[in-house]
């Protein structure tokens, strides 16, 4: 419970009234002094120890630091690059000599965990951000190969597309951050860090229980996301897409040809989604802000053509544009909409978005009889 309480964002759900509590250095030191072990931490971590690198930590007298092969605590990272993805969203790449980044984690248990980021050059408040492996350049290339090979296999029974994994480890930790134009907002500091030369950051993590997805999932999984709230669940949807492509080809052409679509060696039998039905309810401002749209649309297309009950998506675009293969919604999401489309009260319900979005959906689900314990804020 100490680890969950210390690292969880909404780990122990009590609804929308959760408040951020910053533990004292003494509390962190107490936990470190009394830590007796860990549970499956390595397999859940995106971090891998770089034994050849220098283990640079923040000053011993001021901060508690821990050098560990699978998580960063009190370690100094350097911001090395920034890539704009839209007018308000950017990817920030951080490096640390002590770590490399696992680019191809398997399974589900690691998905959705976050990192705590804090400026060092000008002491700032710490903020939580998510890394999204499926949006790395190597995984985007792999996804394009998988989709091309899948389409060829479905049409012709064979494929000439080479599906290869180009990268197993990366040198940078990529975090995705939305800019908020509020005075003294941490994002203002972060977005201007490279230009100002304030590139040193303390990064702790990975933290939290993520999406709390276990092996052998079954039943309905409802995903309520708005804006950048889509980021923590994208790796799950990407896994669902890879599983769907693999399983459809396996049913149609056999395991041998399906193996072409599993270059990462995921155990799709052990981590099967065969008994899962995914329901995706999403509010996005513009097409330009729709990170991971290619994942959503391909999932919806393949599901509708081959597994109609596997994946359904309702998307509301504020700019009134339409998205292919999904159910485009014009009205605002409401309790009436949920009562019409949320057909189960015994599933798993994940919510990630702005505070008002989180509060409304939480309230509506409770009013429909969904158990409080089944609703998770990501």
Image (spheres, helix red, strand yellow):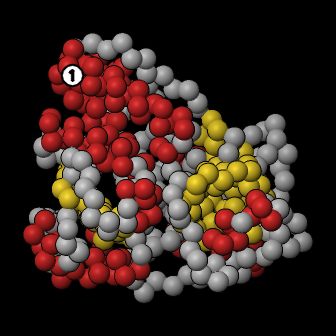
Q: Work out whether residue 372 or residue 278 is closer to the camera in this orientation and state it.
A: 278
Residue 107's image quarter?
A: top left
Q: Quadrant of the C terminus?
A: bottom left
Q: Work out whether residue 206 or residue 232 is closer to the camera in this orientation and state it.
A: 232
Query: How busy is the neighbourhood of tag 1: few (under 14 within 10 Å), some, or many (20 plus)?
Result: some
Vertical comparison of 240 with 229: above or below: above
Q: Is residue 68 visible?
A: no
Residue 55 picture location, percent across and down: 83, 49
215 to the left or right of 306: right
At 46% from the left edge and 31% from the top edge, which residue is drawn? Answer: 142
At 13% from the left edge and 77% from the top edge, which residue is drawn? Answer: 336
Reading the image, the residue beneath label 1 is 154
At 26% from the left edge and 52% from the top edge, which residue is drawn? Answer: 323
Vertical comparison of 269 with 230: above or below: above
Vertical comparison of 149 with 35: above or below: above
Q: Is residue 18 visible?
A: yes
At 77% from the left edge and 61% from the top edge, which residue is drawn? Answer: 195
Residue 223 picture location, percent across and down: 30, 61
Q: Count the marks: how many?
A: 1
Residue 263's image quarter?
A: top left
Under circle 1, the secondary element is helix
170 to the left or right of 267: right
172 to the left or right of 307: right
Residue 196's image quarter?
A: bottom right
Residue 260 picture location, percent across and down: 36, 20
Residue 175 picture location, percent across and down: 59, 56
């Amino acid at each position: 419970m100490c680890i969950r309480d210390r690292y969880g964002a909404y780990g122990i759900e009590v609804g929308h009234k959760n408040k951020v509590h910053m533990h004292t250095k003494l509390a962190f030191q107490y936990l470190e002094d009394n830590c007796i072990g860990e549970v499956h931490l390595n397999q859940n971590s995106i971090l891998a120890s770089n034994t050849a690198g220098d283990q640079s930590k923040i000053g011993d007298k001021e901060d508690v630091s821990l050098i560990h092969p699978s998580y960063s605590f009190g370690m100094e990272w350097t911001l090395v690059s920034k890539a704009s993805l839209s007018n308000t969203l950017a990817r920030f790449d951080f490096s640390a000599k002590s770590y490399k980044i696992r680019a191809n984690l398997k399974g589900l248990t690691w998905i959705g965990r976050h990192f705590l980021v804090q400026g060092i050059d000008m002491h700032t408040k710490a903020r939580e951000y998510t890394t999204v492996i499926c949006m790395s350049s190597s995984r985007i290339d792999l996804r394009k190969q998988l989709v091309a090979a899948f389409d060829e296999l479905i049409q012709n029974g064979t494929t000439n597309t080479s599906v290869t994994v180009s990268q197993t480890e990366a040198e940078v930790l990529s975090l995705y951050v939305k800019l908020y134009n509020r005075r003294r907002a941490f994002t203002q500091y972060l977005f201007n860090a490279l230009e100002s030369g304030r590139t040193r950051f303390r990064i702790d993590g990975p933290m939290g229980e993520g999406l709390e997805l276990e092996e052998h999932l079954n039943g309905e999984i409802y995903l309520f996301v708005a804006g950048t709230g889509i980021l923590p669940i994208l790796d799950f949807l990407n896994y669902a897409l890879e599983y769907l492509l693999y399983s459809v080809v396996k049913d149609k052409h056999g395991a041998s040809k399906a193996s072409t679509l599993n270059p990462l060696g995921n155990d799709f039998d052990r981590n099967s989604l065969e008994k899962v039905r995914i329901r995706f309810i999403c509010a996005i401002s513009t097409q330009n802000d729709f990170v991971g749209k290619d994942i959503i649309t391909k999932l919806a297309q393949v599901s509708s053509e081959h597994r109609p009950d596997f994946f359904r998506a309702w998307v509301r675009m504020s700019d009134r544009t339409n998205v292919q293969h999904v159910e485009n919604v014009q009205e605002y999401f409401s309790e009436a909409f949920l009562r019409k489309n949320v057909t189960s009260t015994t599933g798993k319900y994940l919510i990630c978005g702005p505070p008002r979005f989180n509060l409304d959906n939480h309230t509506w689900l409770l009013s429909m009889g969904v158990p409080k314990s089944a609703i998770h804020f990501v």
